[in-house]
Image (tube, grey):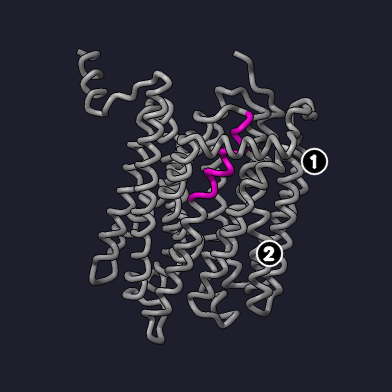
């Protein structure tokens, strides 16, 4: 077995650090939403616009970024993304008006969009194919540590030194990421890229159409759409106000729950990765379990007439913590149902799903909070109504997911791969063991 060179781990470490910092910048507004509302004098609907614009830019750029990674290389894209995020956070730190702050979040969303796909390409270039699926999962999990950086140290700086120092400090991390990437990272082990890695725009368009036409890509998109959005909505904007203003937790208690959410997600990722690798024909059942668990726990929390007990809120964040690693199953669909030359394009298509669902949900929650607030926007009763809009997206996502799964299985059957019903597979396994 060929040993992975130490340089590959160094490149991966810097790339993951850049992605972790990108997650810090992405989630920085979620933990400072109430402060932003006070600083700019805006309503819940306008506050939601921050996250919506940021996610809209992120989602819209996924496919173009995938094409640019093929043409200019992942190293250049990571550096450009880090510098854009740094510029955006500096602009937000100095912003005094709502339009200026919106422009700042546009820059953050654009830089964030360049990072994850680029890091995945570095993983594929520097590591053996057998290592790529596991490292993809680990990359996503470690990167979510950026949520801890925003939930604890950033909040601490925000409430001691103030708005401007907090976001300037966040910007400094992205500058550090850009410098480290320039010094350490190379696109490939030999430092060069072949001509095949700079495809024509005509070929990129062809790959885009081919990837979309495969039902496996659409199955990945609906998987990402339905598993990821609730956790993203919680982390990006509405979770922190819901816990503090709605459920009455202190900032420290809310920060602790966010930390638990990140750590439990890191623990769940390897388990999901093992299950997916051992039972590739049962990935859809795992996806359905994750979706139904989120729906179930939210139903209990929102149905209670009083604030939820601490143990139930803990269960909520534990269930939502699986949304991140669960959404990574979508990229496994993209990988297994597309040839290597279409993987980047298929990944871009899949990555759009959850962020489109999240940005629309965030906006609708803000609009509903304003409608039912009656002068006091951030109340528990208001959150109960507003967060119920999630069910619309779960239903839409489940319908799309089940239709795509049916078409994938039909195509697999036409290609000679039979997927036995779950009951039949379990019966065969019991028979084999006896």
- Asked whether, in this view, residue 48 is left or right of residue 14, the answer is left
- Asked whether, in this view, residue 360 is left or right of residue 396, the answer is right
Q: Main secondary structure of the magenta part?
A: helix
Task: Tell me if residue 265 comes above or below residue 110 in the rendering.
Answer: above
> Which residue: 37% across, 60% down?
390
> Which element is circle 1 on?
helix
> Which residue: 23% across, 71% down?
305
Task: Tell me if residue 44 comes above or below residue 390 in the rendering.
Answer: below
> Can residue 272 be seen from the camera position used here?
yes
**Residue 341 horizontal/vertical position (percent):** 63, 29
For the C terminus, the quadrant is: top left
> Can residue 153 be seen from the camera position used here?
no
> Which element is circle 2 on?
helix
Q: Which residue is mark 1?
A: 183
Task: Tell me if residue 291 comes above or below residue 204 in the rendering.
Answer: below
**Residue 24 horizontal/vertical position (percent):** 59, 56
Q: Which residues are magenta?
A: 341-353
Front residue of 115/8: it is 115
Task: Tell me if residue 171 comes above or below residue 206 in the rendering.
Answer: below
**Residue 122 horizontal/vertical position (percent):** 67, 35
Q: Which residue is mark 2?
A: 89
Is residue 345 located in the magenta-colored stretch of the structure?
A: yes
Front residue of 212/327: it is 212
């Amino acid at each position: 077995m060929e040993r992975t060179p130490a340089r590959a781990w160094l490149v991966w470490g810097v790339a993951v650090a850049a992605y972790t910092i990108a997650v810090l910048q992405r989630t920085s507004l979620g933990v400072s939403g109430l402060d932003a509302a006070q600083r700019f004098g805006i309503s819940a609907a306008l506050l939601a616009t921050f996250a919506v614009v940021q996610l809209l830019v992120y989602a819209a750029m996924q496919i173009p970024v995938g094409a640019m990674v093929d043409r200019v290389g992942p190293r250049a894209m990571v550096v450009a993304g880090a510098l854009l995020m740094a510029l955006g956070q500096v602009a937000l730190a100095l912003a005094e008006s709502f339009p200026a702050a919106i422009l700042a979040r546009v820059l953050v969303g654009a830089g964030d969009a360049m990072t994850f796909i680029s890091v995945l390409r570095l993983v594929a270039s520097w590591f053996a194919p057998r290592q790529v699926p596991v490292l993809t999962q680990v990359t996503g999990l470690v990167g979510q540590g950026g949520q801890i950086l925003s939930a604890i140290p950033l909040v601490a700086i925000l409430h001691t030194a103030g708005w401007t120092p907090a976001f300037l400090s966040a910007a400094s991390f992205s500058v550090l990421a850009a410098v480290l990437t320039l010094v350490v990272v190379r696109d490939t082990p030999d430092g060069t890229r072949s001509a095949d890695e700079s495809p024509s725009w005509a070929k990129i368009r062809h790959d885009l159409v081919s990837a979309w036409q495969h039902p496996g890509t659409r199955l990945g998109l609906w998987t990402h759409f339905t598993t990821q959005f609730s956790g993203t909505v919680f982390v990006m904007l509405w979770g922190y106000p819901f816990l503090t203003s709605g459920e009455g937790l202190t900032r420290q208690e809310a920060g602790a729950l966010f930390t638990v959410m990140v750590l439990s997600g890191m623990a769940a990722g390897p388990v999901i990765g093992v299950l997916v690798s051992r039972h590739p024909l049962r990935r859809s059942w795992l996806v359905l379990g994750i979706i139904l668990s989120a729906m179930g726990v939210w139903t209990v929390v929102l149905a209670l007439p009083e604030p939820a007990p601490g143990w139930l809120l803990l269960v909520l964040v534990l269930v939502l913590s699986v949304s991140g690693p669960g959404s990574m199953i979508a990229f496994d669909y993209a990988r297994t149902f597309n040839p290597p030359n279409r993987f980047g394009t298929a990944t871009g298509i899949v990555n759009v799903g959850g962020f489109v669902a999240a940005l629309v949900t965030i906006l609708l929650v803000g609009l509903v909070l304003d409608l039912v607030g009656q002068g006091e926007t951030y109340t528990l009763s208001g959150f109960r109504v507003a967060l119920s809009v999630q069910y619309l997206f779960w239903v839409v996502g489940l319908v799309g997911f089940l239709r795509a799964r049916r078409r994938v299985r039909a195509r697999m059957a036409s290609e000679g791969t039979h997927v036995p019903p779950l009951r039949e597979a379990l019966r065969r396994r019991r028979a084999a063991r006896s």
